[in-house]
Image (tube, helix red, strand yellow):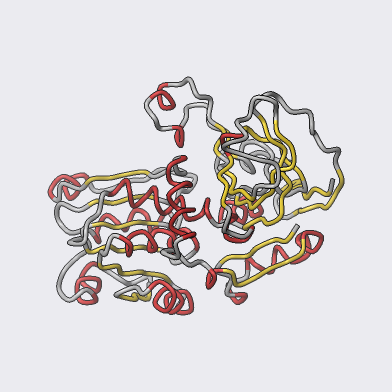
Amino acid sequence: MKTIVLNQPGELHLTSRDVDDVLSDNEALIRIHRIGICGTDYHAYRGKQPFFSYPRVLGHELGAEVVALGKSVDTKQLEIGNKVAVEPYLNCGHCQACQNGKSNCCENLKVMGVHTDGGMCEYVKIPANKLHRSTQLGYEQLALVETLGIGAHAVQRAQLSANDIVLVIGAGPIGLSVIQFAKIQNAQVAVMDFSTQRLEFAKQAMHTDYSITATTEFNTNDLRKALGGKLPTIVFDATGNSHSMMKAFSYLAFGGKLVYVGLFQGDVTFFDPDFHRKEVTLFASRNSLPADFKNIIQQMESGQINTQAWLTHQAAFEELPSVFETWLNPESHVIKAMVVV
C-alpha cells in the first residue's frame, strides 16, 4: 500500500508498505479515503510536537471505509462497507483514568499519528470500537469529526452557559471548533487572532460576535473596550503559543475560567496573587470522548453543524510531500487542508 512517512522534521517521503490485514477478534481493517491535516501534523513537520518521535506515519483525522471485520465484531454496530469517522485515541481500558470514564487522558494513551503510526496510508487496522459510522455523511465530513471533537470536549469542560462572554484565542481549526460549540450554547463569542483573514472567516462562517486583531501591545484595557466594558468569563486558548497562553490569565474577568486547548513544550507560569484574587479556574483539555464523536455525527447529519466552508485546500495523496510545506506559509490562507487517498 502507498504510505507517506515523516522521516525527520521537514522530510515527508512517499513509499510502499505491506498491508497488515491479520485481524484480532475485535479489530477492523479500514480503507482510508480522506485525511484532514491538523496543527499536530504541522508541529511534527517542524519538529515542535511534544510526545513525538521519528520516523512516523502521520494522520489522525480520518474518513474511512470498513473493508474487513474480526470475528467478534458486532455486525449490528458495524458492517463491511460502512463509512466511518476514526477515533484515533488508543486507550488501555484498565488504568485509573479509563476506569473513571476518562479514556481521552488514559495513562497509557497512544494517539494515532503521534505516539504510533497513523492513517497517512491506504489501509489501517484498528479496534472496531474506535469507528463511528454514518449512513449520511461523506468521507470529508467524517474526517472533520475528530477536529470538532477537540472543541466539543473543551466547551464541555468549561460548562459554559448563555450568560457567558467567551474569548477564543486563535482562529485556526481547533479555535473554530471551540467557537462552533460555544455558539451552539448561545454564548457571546469573541475571537482573537493576528490574521484578519481568519477573523473575517470566523465572522462569516461561525457568526462570532466580536473580532479582535491581536497585536504585541494588546492588553486587558484594550480587551475591555472591545467588549463594551466587560471582560470574558471564559477564555479558550487554542494557539499552542507560550506567550499567548500565559498572557491569557490577564484577560479573564474575576471568577473566570481559562481553558488550555493548545499546548507547547515548556512551563506555564502566572502571577499567583492575581490568580487567587480573581479566583481563576484553570482547565486543560485533551482529545475527546467516544460520546463526543457520536453527538457530533448526529449534529452534522441534522445540519446543526456545517463544515463545508472550512475546506479551503486539497491535494491528492501522491502530491502531499511536495505541497505540504506550502500549507505552512501564512500567505496560503489555509483553514483546513484535506488529502484525497
Looking at the picture, how far across and down is residue 114, in whole percent?
A: 61, 41
Looking at the picture, how far across and down is residue 216, in whole percent?
A: 38, 70
Q: Nearer the viewer, residue 194 or 230?
A: 230
Q: Is residue 272 above or below residue 37?
A: above
Q: Is residue 217 above or below residue 31?
A: below
Q: Is residue 5 above or below residue 89?
A: below
Looking at the picture, how far across and down is residue 223, in whole percent?
A: 25, 71
Residue drawn where x is 44% and y is 61% of the image: 302
Looking at the picture, how far across and down is residue 285, in whole percent?
A: 39, 45
Say left or right for 16 vs 207.
Answer: right
Residue drawn where x is 44% and y is 26% of the image: 98
Say left or right for 294 vs 161.
Answer: right
Q: Which quarter of the figure has residue 67?
A: top right
Residue drawn where x is 62% and y is 57% of the image: 36
Quadrant for the N terminus in the image: top right
Residue drawn where x is 41% and y is 64% of the image: 304
Quadrant for the C terminus in the image: bottom right
Q: Nearer the viewer, residue 139 or 168?
A: 139
Total numbered labels: 0
Q: Nearer the viewer, residue 219 or 293?
A: 293
